[in-house]
Image (cartoon, grey):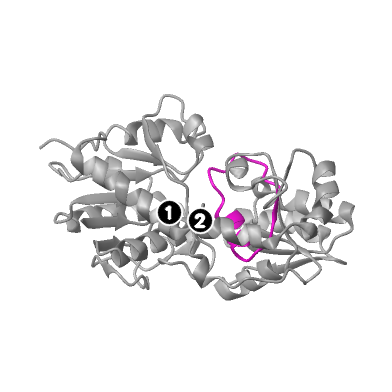
Amino acid sequence: MRIGLIAPPWLTVPPAGYGGTEAVVGLLARGLAELGHEVLLAAAAGSTSPVAQVAGSLPPEPRHLGRGQDELRHVLNAYAQLGAVDIIHDHTLSGPLLRLAGHRIPVVSTAHNAMDDRFLPVYSAVAQCASLVAISRHQSMTATGVAVSGVIHHGIDATQIPVGAGSGGYACFLGRMHPNKGVLTAIRVARRAGVPLRIAAKMRSAGEQEYFQQVIRSELGGTIEYVGELGAAEKFALLGDAFALLNPLQWDEPFGMVMIEAMATGTPVLSTLRGAAPEIVVDGVTGFLRETPNALAAALPGCAQLDRGNCRRATETTFGIRRMVGEHVAFYEKCLAGALASRAVPA
């Protein structure tokens, strides 16, 4: 197949640091190309993905993450150059709604956001002109009134990630510096359990910096350390040396790449029962799932007793790149065969 992939415009593919969607698009592009498909990628200028890329993309602007006008310019340029592909897989929010008049190529759209009041109306409209893919069963089940065509979990290439021994004597937190990621709860859980905690977090936006200054900074010190935003090698070293990833989500996250990244290094995940976490973490095998801070604190030391090999194996099979790419290929084929409503815009 000739496949067009559209990534968001604010980070490169793959990303240099934080960037879950961009990491997934990068793995998908490479995996599809390795299977012999012809891939054309629309991503931020300077992206290092090994597939062909459309011309005219703008440089990445991480500080403007989520800015609408950047995405609109990006997708208009992308669709203008993807006229010769068989199918387009769009990972932006607005792209499927802005297809050029007369564009007859089938479009697949992946929903990377929660199905809450902010996004449900948007995805309801997207599903009218594209085959919509959810990234977890929880996300699909909460998509009230939205026509979801399939569920495909994200995957990871574990062969590119070193296995750690978990011998650092600490738990870690990895994510955005935002209240819904649960960094404050992670600090309090680690203190209650008497466990050192290392925090690596993206802190680029004004809101993230304000939250850090007003809420988190005063909580640091002693065994609680903020180590900044890390590049890929540093991130996997941090995860691999930790005996647990502390992931006390305060929202229904649609997937959560950080959990499978930790598991790829062999590190178990301790998470709240929110969003897709129960689809990723097998309680008592690859981590623990608990509902309250007290229960999280009680379970945290037990992560050191879990078999790290089980965590790694889950990312080689259930959450492996081969499974993810294969499911996407099968989905594209169904769209092209008419088995799914690919919803090409009429001329």
Q: What is the span of residues highlighted in magenta in the rendered image? A: 248-270
Image quadrant where residue 57 sits = bottom left
Q: Label 2 neighbourhood size at 10 Å, few (<14), some (14-19), many (20+)? A: some
Task: Give the residue pinned by disc 1.
Answer: 323
Q: Is residue 262 magenta?
A: yes
Q: Nearer the viewer, residue 8 or 22?
A: 22
Q: Is residue 174 magenta?
A: no
Relative side of 270 to 188, left or right: left
Relative side of 28 to 283, left or right: left
Secondary structure of residue under mark 1? helix
Q: Label 1 neighbourhood size at 10 Å, few (<14), some (14-19), many (20+)? A: some
Image quadrant where residue 1 sits = bottom left
Residue 163 in the image: x percent, y percent?
62, 71
Secondary structure of residue under mark 2? loop
Tell me if label 2 and label 1 are in contact, CB under 8 Å. Answer: yes
Classify 158 as above or below 192.
below
Residue 10 in the image: x percent, y percent?
42, 61
Q: Nearer the viewer, residue 313 or 192?
A: 313
Question: Which image quadrant: the C terminus?
Answer: top left
Report if residue 3 is visible in the image: yes
As shown in the figure, which amino acid type bears the numbered disc 1? Arg
- Tell me the residue at 83%/51% (across/down): 188
Q: Which mark is residue 317?
A: 2
As shown in the figure, which amino acid type bears the numbered disc 2? Thr
Q: Nearer the viewer, residue 304 or 115?
A: 304
